[in-house]
Image (cartoon, helix red, strand yellow):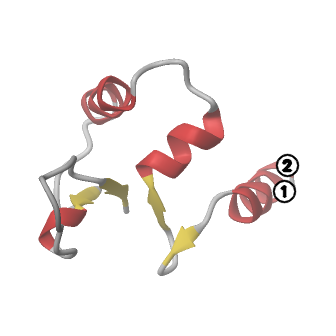
Amino acid sequence: MFEERLIKLFMELIKIYRGNLVGARKLHQFLKSKREFATWIKQRINRYDFVENSDYFLLDKFVKQSGRGGHNAKVKC
């Protein structure tokens, strides 16, 4: 019961993309982490053994960037 309420709360507070995909930056903002995003996401990927293209993917493969570069966005699957 508690887990269901927690999931519902997250779904209401974090924008969910196509089912169960969550933007890592949105999650970082929601959690109000004091760490720099790049450091935070790298540590999460390493700590939980996330696998690229299985547990997360880089948006630059799907979204064309314009301008002078920028950072890759990582999305948790």
14 displayed left or right of 22? right
13 displayed left or right of 54? right
21 vs 66, nearest the viewer: 66
Image position, residue 22 (x, y; %): 48, 60
Residue 17 shows which numbered tag?
none
Q: Amino acid at mark 2?
A: Phe
53 displayed left or right of 5? left
- Cβ atoms under marks 2 and 1 closer than 8 Å: yes
Quarter of the image for residue 53 reads: bottom left
71 displayed left or right of 16? left
- SS for dot 2: helix
Q: Tell me the residue that label 2 is attached to.
A: 2
**Real-space Cα distance between discs 2 and 1?**
5 Å
**Residue at the extreme bottom of the image, as rendered:** 18
Image position, residue 18 (x, y; %): 47, 81
76 vs 13, nearest the viewer: 13
- SS for dot 1: helix
**Residue at 85% over, 49% down:** 2
**Residue at the extreme top of the image, as rendered:** 34
Q: Callout 1: few (<14), some (14-19), or many (20+) C-alpha neighbours within 10 Å?
A: few
Depicted 48 relative to depicted 53: above or below: above
**Residue at the extreme front of the image, as rendered:** 67
Q: Tell me the residue that label 1 is attached to.
A: 5
**Residue at 54% over, 18% down:** 34
In the rendered image, the quadrant that contains the C terminus is: bottom left
Q: Amino acid at mark 1?
A: Arg
**Residue at 34% over, 34% down:** 41
